[in-house]
Structures are given as C-alpha cells and as structure tokens.
Amino acid sequence: MNILGIDVGGSGIKGAPVDIETGTLLAERVRIKTPKSGEPEPMAEVVRQIAQSFNWSGPIGIGFPAPIKGGVTMMAANVSEKWVGTNADALFTTITGCECTMINDADAAGLAEMSFGAGRGQPGTVIMVTLGTGIGTAIFHRGHLLPNTEFGHLEIKGVDAEFRASDSARQREELSWKKYAKRVNKYLKAMDKLFWPDLFIIGGGISKESEKFLPLLTLETPVVPAQLLNEAGIVGAALAVRRNG
C-alpha cells in the first residue's frame, strides 16, 4: 500500500509517497520552506502543494510538531499559537482534498525506526529523540508506542531542554561539536534516570552528522543514529495512516 507521508517541521515541510510494506520512498522527496507565520492555513497550503506535485489523490499521513489528540493539535512550541485547539485532520483534509491522518512528528519518526530501522526487533524500552528546530521524543516499550510524550520540554538548568540541546540551539550559539555533545549528554542522562531505557535512537536533521557528536557521549545506555536518517518522519507519517485505520 502506498501512502503520501508529510513531515512538518519548524523550518521545512517535506513529503514523498511511501511503500508502507517496505518503508521505502517511491520518489524523491519534495521540501518547501515552512511559512514564516507558522499559521494553519499557509502551512496546510504547503502540504497541498506537495501533494499536488505528486498528483496525489489518496490518503496522506502528516507528522506534526505537537501532541495530537483525535486529530486536534494540543499545543504549539515551534509554530503559531493559532494551531492550539485546531482540528488539523479536518483542516488538511479540506485544503488538500485527500483524507489526512495526523500524528506527532517524533512519534512518526519512532514508528519508522521501530518498523524498519534501528529499533527493529528491540524487545525492551526504546526512546527516539529527534534533534532539529526543537527536541521531539517517542517512547516505546516492547514495540508499543506511548503517544504524545513531550520531553523536549524537560527543564535543564531552568530552561526547556530544546533551548539548549536542539540542533537549532547548536547553530544559534555556534557551539563546537564537543560543547554540543556535552549538552546532549546531559539531556540524555536526565532521560536515562527517568526511564532506564535499553536504547536511545537519535534522529532529526542532525542524524546525518551523528559521527561528529555521538562518539563523544558518555552514557552507559547505547545511543545509535536513526537508520532512516531524516526520512524517518515521512515514513512514519505514512505508517500512521495504517496504524489509525
């Protein structure tokens, strides 16, 4: 079964058709910059443009940077506050003309990695951490997802972790990889003490440069890069359609 997967991020919106039986993208992904306003209608219009670029008329799965309950976005950390309480399922379905299914973006990336990537076959507790504009988390136990965890907002030194350890924080503060690794290490150690996972998977845009900072971490718990790299969000968004069907 083929489904269009969309990964909505704070800086870019990406999409491609996905074969959900194999987790492979069926065409080169299309990426369009996220509208500066971050408001619902302009962002939904970008998703429509991506769908149109593939002449898509089937179901669409959309990973979005917020907790999703019943298709409604519950908060807005890196997009407009106008998303709070918006029925995103209905909005995207109306504007694209396709049946749309919403899922938290980190949950989507986690689903992809548990199905086709670094978490496949892992029997214990696995935490997916996406490092991008913010920090997303997805927690799995014996392959089952605990949806809508938002531990990117865990406080470290009095501020949200994502203001110190996201990839955007690294770029904003022009941190060396060594200094950045220390911040990521502190964050993962805090998560380690809360959940005692068997594996951390690091995803998001920075995962393609994982060799620059993951070897500098000092956790006892294994930490590995996402195997699907930055495509995990697209693949997992597509998987969410089957999961919710």
Image (cartoon, rainbow, N blue to C red):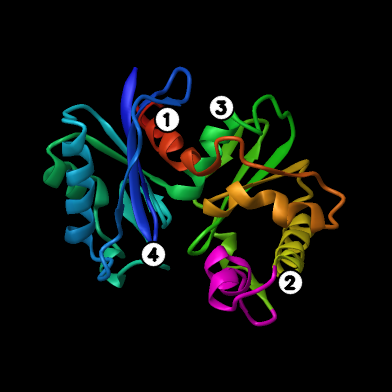
Please state the extent of the stretch shown in magenta in the rendering.
157-176
**Labelled pair 3, 1 in contact (Cβ < 8 Å):** yes
Residue pointed to by mark 3: 115
Instruction: From this view, report whether residue 13 is shown above or below residue 59.
Output: below
Quadrant of the rendering where the N terminus is positioned: top left
Residue 44: x %, y % from top left = 21, 52
Label 2 residue SS: helix
The label shown at residue 117 is: none
Residue 50: x %, y % from top left = 23, 42
Residue 90: x %, y % from top left = 19, 46
Residue pointed to by mark 2: 179
Instruction: From this view, report whether residue 186 is shown above or below residue 235.
Output: below
Residue pointed to by mark 4: 75
Residue 120: x %, y % from top left = 64, 27
Kindly identify the residue that appears in the image at 73 percent across and 64 percent down.
181
Residue pointed to by mark 1: 239
State which mark lies toward you, 3 or 4: 3
**Residue density around tag 3, few if under 14, some if 14–19, many if 20 or more, within 10 Å:** some
Dot placed on the residue nearer the N-terminal end, 4 or 2: 4
Task: Estimate the spatial distance between the alpha carbons at disc 4 and disc 2, rounded to whole Å.
Answer: 30 Å
State which mark lies toward you, 4 or 1: 1
Dot placed on the residue nearer the N-terminal end, 1 or 2: 2
Dot placed on the residue nearer the N-terminal end, 3 or 1: 3
Residue sitting nearer the eye, 104 or 46: 46
Dot placed on the residue nearer the N-terminal end, 2 or 3: 3
**Labelled pair 1, 2 in contact (Cβ < 8 Å):** no
| Amino acid type at mark 3 | Ser
Task: Estimate the spatial distance between the alpha carbons at disc 2 and disc 3, rounded to whole Å.
Answer: 33 Å
Task: Estimate the spatial distance between the alpha carbons at disc 3 and disc 1, rounded to whole Å.
Answer: 9 Å
Residue sitting nearer the eye, 65 or 140: 65
Q: Is-magenta flag for residue 98?
A: no
**Residue density around tag 1, few if under 14, some if 14–19, many if 20 or more, within 10 Å:** many
